Amino acid sequence: MTDLEVTVTEDCAGTGQCVLVAPTLFGLDEEGLSTVIAPVDTVERAEAARRAADLCPMGAIRIVG
Amino acid sequence: MPGTAVRTSIPDIERRLTDPSFWADPYPTYDVLRREAPVYWSETQGRWLVTAFDLAEQVLTRPADFSSVGFESRHIARLPQEVGAQAGRVAEHFATPQLVSSDPPDHTRIRRAFGSHFLPRKVASLGDLIRATAARLVNTADREQFDVVADLAEPLPVHVISDVVGIPHEFRNRIPPVTLDQREFFGSPDIVPDHAVRFTDSLEEWHGLLTGWMDERRVDPQDDVLTRAAQMVDEDRVTHDEAIATLLHLVIAGNGTTTALIGNALYHILRDPEQAKRIAEDRELIPNAIEETLRYETPLPSDRRIATRELSLGDAAIPEGDLVMAVLAAANRDPAHFPDPERFDITRRFQDRHHFAFGRGIHLCLGAPVARLEAAIAVEAVFDHFGDPGLVAGFEPDWHAITTHRGLRTLPVRASR
């Protein structure tokens, strides 16, 4: 278990980089913008979330915890 | 310090890389590099060439190790003295942080300031306008002498990026020259003082024009990037110089590469009558054909970074400060990532459109959604107009011989029947 809370901010531009690196954690909504689709409940997902945050062109992934 | 790195030498490779015939088909040379030394120091080019998919991905996704800052100043410093002496204005322009030549946090700040005009919803709303422009260009061209490049692939992106940014119609014919000036300045192997003088004059002109238009938007706001730029400056989110540099970058980046993409797509589709027929019968295949073109004939063949410290990448040790090229065109044909990479297949399945034509990570092309939409509409327009388009008998491709642009000089197309 991890206590990380991952959110996508309004800076998201739908580049899809997070979906590529963490497909189990992020998906694109009907507007083509990123959304968190699963809880960050494993160490692997926490690592993937950090990687996605690093790769986001808009710096739109916020990780708290 | 140079000389401490592990450098592999490959017989004959430097000659192949610099031979004029390289441009006719660069891919066998990329294959040799990827096989023999996927991180290769090219003595004649003064840069590392990274040709394997996984290693190119490292270069693109580690901005702290592979910086986007400093390429232009370094390029200018290495020009022959008589050229560099003419390039003061160019150096100043590129010393300003802008999308392609900045690292976080500047990059994130600038990207956020301009990103709102490239959201999926915003881009989708451009479809009707792009379709109308493409139809007008195709319908007014000479049907018997139709050249995809001159009649459609060059003018369409100029109009589209001008509509997005807000460039008035009477100035749009100034866009191709400044695009060419920049391409020659950074990509031509035999640059002369005239290039530098011309590019300096172009930059001077554009700084004046863009500044004037931003001032106009302050009193008369529009739904365009110029208005957004003026707002961002007034809210102190970007500086005036950053706004100008970014606007000009959008204008230039928004047209040359898309021109190449449209020509490359139609060339490869029409070369194979079988696949052309499938598209004539089912336009839904076009978007994936564009993805395959991006992979197979990547319009921007490589992206550049500078090593921020001594690094190891694959088997190579890269000294701090060295120029490192992620050769996107080579990575996009890496057999370890793409089955049967030498085959152009409009039905190839991509996982999440995963190829490197638009880069990867934080510098992923801002205009990618516009380029994809424009290219698909352009291909559609040619099929709509000709019904059954085909290459002219005996057509031999003539490629631009430049490291920063993979595109055809002409592409004559006729109705097959």
Image (tube, coloured by chain):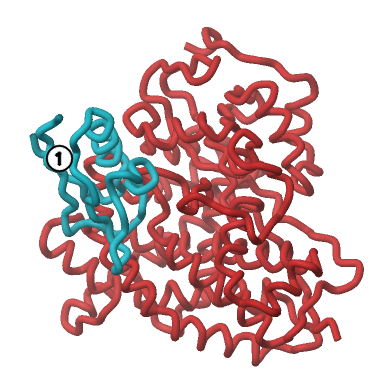
Which residue is more in the foreground, B314 or B178? B314
> Which residue is found at the position 45% from the left and 32% from the top?
B59
> Looking at the picture, how far across and down is residue B414, in whole percent?
80, 81
> Looking at the picture, how far across and down is residue B131, in whole percent?
51, 84
Q: Colour of chain B?
A: red
Report in which chain the residue with disc 1 lies.
Answer: A
> Which residue is found at the position 78% from the left and 37% from the top?
B19
User: Image quarter for residue B153?
Assistant: bottom right
User: Image quarter for residue B139?
Assistant: bottom right
> Looking at the picture, how far across and down is residue B85, in whole percent?
49, 42
- Tell me if residue A3 comes above or below residue B113 in the rendering: above
Kindly tell me whether residue B95 is visible in this rendering. Answer: no
> Which residue is found at the position 69% from the left and 57% from the top?
B345
> Which residue is found at the position 58% from the left and 90% from the top?
B136
The crowd level at tag 1 (other Cα within 10 Å; few <14, some 14-19, many 20+) is some
> Looking at the picture, how far across and down is residue A21, in whole percent?
36, 41
Kindly tell me whether residue B316 is visible in this rendering. Answer: yes
User: Image quarter for residue B48?
Assistant: top right
Q: Colour of chain A?
A: cyan
- Tell me if residue B65 comes above or below residue A64 in the rendering: above
Q: Which residue is mark 1?
A: A63
